[in-house]
Image: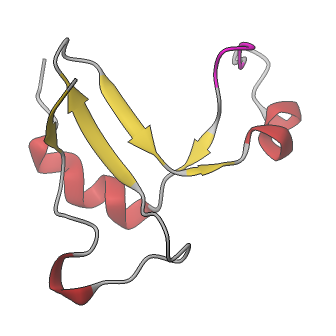
Amino acid sequence: MFVRRLGPDPHAGGRQSAGANGCPDILEMEDGDFAVIGIDITDAATSKLPPSAGCGSDERIVRVPRRTLIEARFDIPDQ
């Protein structure tokens, strides 16, 4: 299902995650899509989405720390 992690291991170098049990992560899937592990903010964020954005009943809005995305940018393919 998952091919690789984008960016470094969130626990590399002894880093700790805020939740202690989990950690934000970005993973590439076998079909080329991406999976994101983050804090579920759907309930708080849905009403604040821009008019042209929506969150379907089978979708969730997750918060990914800035550092996680920035560190993954070199692993994100151009196409």
> Which residue is at the far right?
47
Residue 25 image position (x, y, % from top left): 35, 52
The residue at 38%/83% (across/down) is: 16
The residue at 16%/18% (across/down) is: 30
Tally of numbered discs: 0
Relative to 76, residue 6 above or below: below
**The C terminus, quarter of image:** top left
Q: Was residue 24 drawn as part of the magenta stretch in this picture? A: no
Residue 52 image position (x, y, % from top left): 71, 14
The residue at 64%/21% (across/down) is: 59
Relative to 23, residue 17 above or below: below
Which residues lie in the magenta part? 55-59
Relative to 68, residue 45 above or below: above
Q: For the stretch drawn in magenta, what is the main secondary structure? A: loop
Q: Is residue 74 left or right of residue 24?
A: left
- Colour scheme used in the picture? secondary structure
The residue at 65%/30% (across/down) is: 60
- Give the camera-side residue of 73 and 29: 29
Residue 40 image position (x, y, % from top left): 66, 46
- Give the camera-side residue of 54 and 34: 34
Q: Is residue 58 left or right of residue 31?
A: right
